[in-house]
Image (cartoon, rainbow, N blue to C red):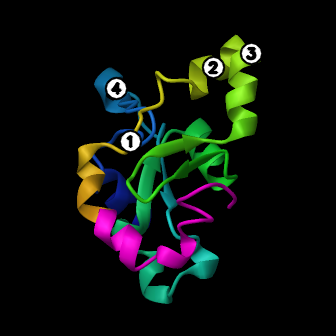
Amino acid sequence: MFVLNVLSHRGQRCVFCELNPSAFGARHMLVAGHIKPREDSAPSEHLDPRNGLAACPSHDVAFDTGLLTIGPALQIHVSEALANAGRDDPLTRQYYGRPPLLETLPPRYSSRRRRLENQWVGLLPVRLGTGGS
């Protein structure tokens, strides 16, 4: 239920690069990830689509491992390690450079900024700030 709700409420696009698999008839190319990790969430947050991001698999893993993070102003940060790899490797740059990575989360996530800042402020430095997972 969480996955379906997140994907339907987030426009069927990757939050990091705006990949839209439905535009070319593909299915199952996006995953729904938790912003606030399940282990740090209350049971009511586990299935709450407001605690979800839709992402393509590569960007989902990068977010889960702290290579991509989201700042309090909803800006997308690339870790130093990933940025360095992108300078040296054209394939890494193709997936994690700008473009395709956006500078900030798409407008459909802007209504959640206050929730991210206020409710999950303790997680901002970890999951949504300067790195780590």
Which is nearer the N-term, disc 2 or disc 4? Answer: 4
- Determine if the magenta segment contains residue 110: no
Give 112 or 25, whichever is nearer the viewer.
112
Q: Badge 4: how crowded within 10 Å, few (<14), some, or many (20+)?
A: few
- Badge 1: few (under 14), some or many (20 or more) residues near its Cα, within 10 Å? some
Q: Indicate the secondary structure of the residue bearing disc 3.
A: loop
| CA–CA distance in space, label 2 to label 4 | 26 Å
Name the disc covering residue 93, or none: 2
Q: Residue at x 39, y 68 (%)?
A: 116
SS under mark 2: helix
Q: Residue furthest top?
A: 90
Image marks 3 and 2: residues in contact by CB distance under 8 Å? yes
Q: Nearer the viewer, residue 105 or 28?
A: 105
Q: Quadrant location of residue 21?
A: top left
Residue type beneath disc 3: Asp
The answer to whether marks 1 and 3 mark residues whose Cβ atoms lie closer than 8 Å is: no
The first of marks 1 and 3 along the sequence is 3
Q: Is residue 1 visible?
A: no
What element does badge 1 sit on?
loop
Residue 33 on image: x %, y %: 51, 58
Q: Amino acid at mark 2?
A: Arg
Marks 1 and 4 in Cβ contact (< 8 Å): no
Amino acid at circle 4: Gly
- The stretch of residues the image draws in magenta is 113-133
The residue at 46%/76% (across/down) is: 120
- Does residue 101 appear to the left or right of 24 in the view shown? right
Q: Where residue 25 is drawn, which disc sits there?
A: 4
Query: In the rendered view, would you say 116 is above or below 68?
Result: below
Identify the residue shown where x is 67% and y is 45%. 67
Which residue is identified by label 3?
89
Q: Which mark is first along the chain, 4 or 1? A: 4
Say which of marks 1 and 4 sits in front. 1
